[in-house]
Image: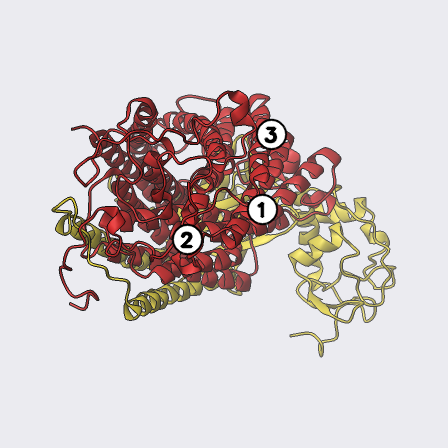
Amino acid sequence: MQSQLPLYPPQASNFAPHVDALMIFVTSVCVFFAFAITVAVVYFFFKYHRKQPNEVGVPILGDSRLEAAWIIVPLIIALGMFSWGAVVYVDYRHSPPDVLDIYLIGKQWMWKAQQPNGLKEINELHVPVGRNVRLTLASEDVIHNFFVPAFRVKMDVVPGRYNTMWFRPTVPGRYHFFCSQYCGTNHAVMGGWVTVMEPTDYAAWLSGSGGGQANPVAAGEKLFADKACATCHLANGTGRAPSLNGLYGTQVLLADGTTVTADDAYIRESILQPNAKIVAGYQPLMPTFQGQLTEEQILALTAYIKSLQSQPVPAKGAGIAPSSTGKK
Amino acid sequence: MNQTAPTAPAPAYQMPRDHYLNSSYGIKSWLLTTDHKRIALLYLISVTFFFFIGGVFATMIRIHLLTPNGALVTPETYNKLFTMHGVAMIFFFLIPSIPAVLGNFLIPPMIGAKDLAFPKINLLSWYIYIVGGCFVLYSFSTGGLDTGWTFYTPLSSIYSNSAVTPAVIGIFINGFSSILTGLNFIVTIHTMRAPGMTWFRLPLFAWAHYATSLIMILGTPVIAITLLLVGFERMFHLGFFNPSMGGDPILFQHLFWFYSHPAVYIMILPAMGVISEIIPTFARKPIFGYSFIAASSIAIAVIGFLVWAHHMFVTGESAYAALAFSFLSYLVAIPSAVKVFNWTSTLYKGSISWDAPMLYALGFIGLFTIGGLTGLFLACLGLDIHIHDTYFVIAHFHYIMVGGAVMGYVGGLHFWWPKITGRLYPEALSRFAAIVLFIGFNLTFFPQFILGYLGMPRRYHSYPPEFQVLNVLSTAGASVLALGYLLPMIYLTWSMRYGKVAGPNPWPATGLEWKTDSPPPTENFHVTPVVDWDPYDFNNRPDLGLVAGAPLAPAHGDD
């Protein structure tokens, strides 16, 4: 139970104890220095209070050893803070390999989450306890920020790109999330609740309330046909554009000789700015879909392309780099 | 006795017969003046006007946040209030306050010059400030501004329906005022020092302004052009920052913070200069580590240009970039720490008076120390992912900008008021006001550190009920803080007419500006002064009227 005036929010993710420990360390160091300076100033203030109107102080011009000490000692302590902070941050910025992928779209002024099975939620996010969860964040308009105080993590949601963040919920419960990047009129009410559930409850919730929800793969497949993607991206690799079978997650060989991993960000970029990265052996023919697809539709297309992972890769025309140049 | 008494048996001073205030009369003699002292007073009136406007917005913000659902205004209005509070306070009060008022007034007499190097450019800079200010006031009064003072794109460039364009034009114009002031200071300090005023005899106030001027000249063009690009994107739909037109919203943040982080040092460095003058004067001894304090100002100005992306740790910027900027942010903390240690050491074995300027200076040390130390929390990558964009940040930068810069400004006004006006203010009342300001400030902003760690994001017109207690505390503190600002406004104004005549050097202080009349003549000195003493040296200055008594202890503080 928290008291009426808590000093910190509930600890409900793998990061929370680390961030709080770091907070206690930095606070202790800072309180020590603030206390030392306050005591010195107050002591001198009374001890050396002017007794006679004409009195002057003792002319002490300085001391290089002292100067060296109070440059070097704070520097060492600061480097300690830097290093510890860096360890926590690097951990936060590199999601572990086995994650539950959830997509989150911010728009003025609401959040739309999409679970792995396509289940959609608005201003709610359900996650299982003990599982690494990676959020892929996209914005339909301005910059937002997804912030869960109980998890001690936040990340900007930037239009035009995907950001990712991850955490592992540790305590079942319901926790506030906020938009913490000012995004216009109703910024303050652009929030909701994260519900952390036992894995069995989560599985039941996913299947139970999923009825009637559009499957993103099906939606993506329909879009793929509607937007005439299939005219060029033939599955057998004989089209004017590379086959997308088995593409997701592999290395793609580009016209300039470099390779790129076919992840969500690459697929998004290839849809919106097709000329940014040209697959080796193909012409820059694809029109841009900038402004013609919502972030949700891009996610659906990505889900469909992902689903082609299991399809047979054609011998020619896949764009996938030979395994010798790939990292795998 | 209700007046600040000179420490020597008080001779009855008379106002000098001729000084810069009575050299000519009439509105034209003010609006067409090239006297740096009169221009400083023009700035004093204008920045006080903007401080008052920003203060009214702040008051409304604090009243609104008394209840979780917002007690006063609509969400649209609230967003405009905090935006206009930030724009008025930062661009039109904090940045010009100390340099354009105190720096303008004091740098020429401090170095023994008759005026700044370019008096007409100095007047021009004030007019530019006024024109820029008019554009911003136009924006405020025709729909207001709701982008946040940070103008983040694409919210500011595409989505906001408020009067963004006149505001960014106003800030663009105002930038030139800042650049010209910086240019004037640098040229003046280089070329117009009196005979004997070597670089290492310069007052630390001048060193701080030199460092500040470097930032003004090198940084301001970047923000001016960046905000102009926002205006172009709004007016002509050129895609600089809007991703749907091929722009990059993160690019805006890089450009914005490239100036706006160093701008924090434009606000705090001059205040540090003020403190470096007040402390040795009221401790009556040379400042401890003069060259380290001077060098730390330059170090802050230089390293301060290399830390901007610490505002962007959670934008998804490269983790490697974040590591570099976090490291550099810790480096820039060191010169500030050096200053605090040196100021504190200066008090050791001093002859400390409890006059109002000293109370403000010691208050500055306390508040700036908290503000600076909490910067270490935000520079810490692992902590920033939690406290970024929360009230922790609000508390931190108000400790620096209000607790630091404004405390320094008000302290400096009290210190040099006798020089500027020739008169003293009520002593007991001024001490009382300094204490009220210190207490009110802490009551207002300390609860916000806790609010931030609990997770309350900034710029919220409504909030979950669990945050209410701390918000009410903060608002209660703000009413004490407001009293702390109103008191000096009232008694300083009163003293201009009714205060006791100060005489040339009431404290007494060692600087060259105290060797001339109060208020000084238009040309500052009747005879060009020659400097043959070291800064802050009270022991070899018989002209100060102090008995250079036998030292209390060996002069090197080894014991």
Q: Are marks 3 and 2 in contact (CB under 8 Å)?
A: no
**Residue B558 appearing in the image:** yes
Q: What color was chain A assigned in the picture?
A: yellow
Q: What is the three-letter code of the residue carrying label 1? A: Thr
Alpha-carbon span between mark 1 and mark 3: 17 Å
Mark 3 or mark 2, whichever is nearer to me: 3
> In the image shown, does B364 or B211 lie closer to the viewer?
B211
> Label 3 crowding class (10 Å Cα cut-off): few <14, some 14-19, many 20+?
some
Pick the quarter of the image with the C terminus of chain B: bottom left
Alpha-carbon span between mark 1 and mark 2: 24 Å
Which chain appears red?
B
Q: Are marks 1 and 2 in contact (CB under 8 Å)?
A: no
Q: Residue A102 at what x, y percent from top left?
A: 55, 51
Pick the quarter of the image with the N terminus of chain B: top left
Q: Quadrant of residue A290?
A: top right
Circle 3 residue? B131
Q: Residue furthest bottom?
A: A324
Q: Residue B378 bears which disc, if any?
A: 2
Circle 1 residue? B220
Q: Quadrant of residue B297?
A: bottom left
Q: Residue A292 at what x, y percent from top left?
A: 76, 41
Residue at horizontal 15 percent and vertical 44 percent from the top? A53
